[in-house]
Structures are given as C-alpha cells and as structure tokens.
Amino acid sequence: MYCSLDGRDLLSIADLSVNDIDAILDLALAAKRGDDLGRPLAGRNLAMIFQRPSNRTRVSFEVAIQRLGGHPIPIFGMEIQIGEREAVHDVGRTLDRHVDGIVARLLSHRDLVGLAQAAVHPVVSAMTDREHPCQLLADLLTVRETLGGLRGVPVTYVGDGNNVCTSWLYGAAICGIDLRVLCPPGYEPAVDVVERAASLRRDGATLLLTNDADQGLRGAEIIYTDVWTSMGQETEQVRRREDFAHLQVNAALVAKAMPSARIMHCLPAHRGEEITDEVLDSSRAIVFDQAENRMWAQQALLALIYTPDMRAIDGGAG
C-alpha cells in the first residue's frame, strides 16, 4: 500500500484519509514484527520542540527517528520561547534553514499552524491544546492489534472532551468506528469538532454523545479514559474532581461494558482519580501496549513522510 503523505503538514487526524491511516498502521505492524524500514532519515536532522513536559512523546519520537537513521534535536520551551523571545514564523523559518523537519509539542494549535506555514520541510504535530494525532495513531494501532480490526468496533471514551477526545472523534469517523463519548454535562467536545467529525464519517462510523454511563458503555469492547485535569487547567482541579467522580473507571463502571472489554489510557494516569489501580493493573488493561505503540506508529509515519513510495507489507485487516 502506498501512502500519499508527501507535501502535507500533518496537523490533524482529520487531514488523513482512511487509506493514509491504513498505510501507517500496516507499516507500523510490519516494523513491530521485525521488518526493516531502512534508513529514510539517514543524514537528516529533525528538530523536536517541547513546550509541554514529555515522557512518552519525547522518548518514542527520539527512538523512532534514530531507528530510521536520523538525528533528533530536542528544543525545550525556555530555550526557544515561541511567541515571546521570537515570533512563531521567525522560529519556523530559522529552523527550516537548519533541519529537515519539525516535530512540535506546543501549547497552542495556532502556533503549530504558524510553524507549518513558515516551514518548507514537514511539520508533525506531537500534541497541541486542540489535538493529539500521534497518540491517536498509536491508539488505533493498539485496537487493531487487540481486536483484529477497526471498523464497527464499539469504543467508549470516558472523560473530558479534550484534545485526545477530538482526535478520537476524527479518527473514529474516518475509520468507521462506533464511538461513544461519555462525559459529565458541560464537558462535551466543542460543537465545531463534532460537526467536523460528522462530515468525515464513512460507512459504519457512528457517534454518540452521552452523559449516561449505562448508555455509553453498553456493548463497549474498548473503554478509553484520560486525565480529568489537563495541563493548564490546574485551577479547575477541585471542581473537575467533583464533576467527574461518578465516571471514574473502576470495577463497577467497567462492569457496564462487555465482559471482555479492554481498558486504554493515553497516560500519564492519575491513579485513584480517573482510574483505579485495580483496573489499570488488571489483565484487561492494554495501556502499556499503547505506550509502546507510540514509537511504532511514529516510526511508520516518519518513514512514509520521508519515503512516500514505501510499500508496507500487509499488516492485517483495517
């Protein structure tokens, strides 16, 4: 399968087609089972901008870049001070003279777009306040590995309508997933996000927004959660704990789904808050498979960006 990612900035899962996503997942599975993706980044330098603290994102991207023969250059928020010490467009234009691409984990999606507009080389979103597309690719890879496919899979997202939820809405619509978003009143995803997801929907994709746990979890094969309070929302922490308490992913809530339902979390987890130790450490949790799959999905993504004619060996049904 060929992937048509060349020449496009990957700022949103919504920018990808189902064929694009299938190509990334096929290649990721091929790499994970030991196939050599070559060294498409040999002689290339990639800047990695981190305005937000990172564990999985930094390590997984660094390893992926090095596996492909490239040289990652981490740049942290205080060093670059985007929009303060230097204008976003100036940062993008300067880096573009030195490196062959930018991976950016930024506070503002608007700044990500600014970098992409200023740069000629590829710009990959490693998370913004609006979306978390590379996390979503790893999530889709994990679901496909676990259940054998994506289309029609009942997935319940439990939590805030945040950036991870947005990427899930777009990815589910494109891949034909039966997605239910279960959140407290007032924490639903933005109306424009839901509308865009609806416009991307292919045959088989369904979307349910609900505040009712019984309705949202009925028949679910995947239960997915995230922190209740994201970075930048610390002043809301007490109120959020109260508003979300009834949706903690614990044994009672998990029992509302299918007996075989698997548990996912993008990490870091606030144990005892949005998820209990009992659930997170259970045999039904595939959380650390997700964490590992960040590297495989991102390695495949980068390989396809820099070698657009790379053919993936069939990794299984999508």
Image: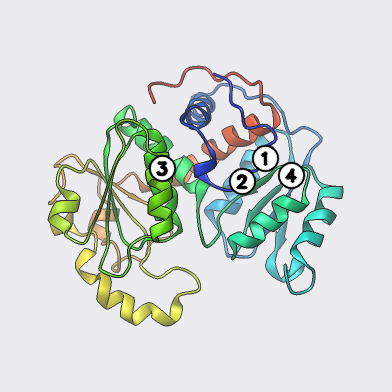
x and y percentages locating residue 105 in the rendered image: 61, 57
- Asked whether residue 168 appears in the rendered view, the answer is no
Which label is found at residue 228?
A: none
Residues at badges 1 and 2 in contact (C-beta under 8 Å)? yes
Q: Report the front residue among 247 and 161.
A: 161
The quarter holding residue 94 reads bottom right
Query: Circle 3 is placed at which residue position?
Result: 199
Q: Which mark is residue 61?
A: 2
Q: Earlier in the sequence, mark 4 or mark 1?
A: 1
Left or right of 244 in this view: 100: right
Determine the residue positioned at 50% across, 33% down: 17
Which of the two marks, 4 or 1, is nearer to us in this view? 4
Q: How many marks?
A: 4
Q: Is residue 192 visible?
A: yes
Please, what is the three-letter code of the amino acid marked with disc 3?
Answer: Ser
User: Residue flagged by tag 2: what amino acid is it?
Assistant: Phe
The 10 Å Cα crowd at callout 4, few under 14, some 14 to 19, many 20 or more, is many
Give me the C-alpha separation between circle 1 and circle 2: 6 Å
Q: SS class of the residue under badge 4?
A: loop
Residue 15, by quadrant, is top right
Q: Is residue 67 left or right of residue 160?
A: right
Q: Residue at x 71, y 71 (%)?
A: 78
Q: CA distance from mark 4 to mark 2?
A: 13 Å
Near mark 3 (Cα within 10 A), the count class, few <14, some 14-19 or many ≥20, is few
Question: What number is the disc on residue 65?
Answer: 1
Q: Amino acid at mark 4?
A: Gly
**Of the residues tagged 2 and 3, which is closer to the observer?**
3
Residue 18: x and y in percent read: 46, 30
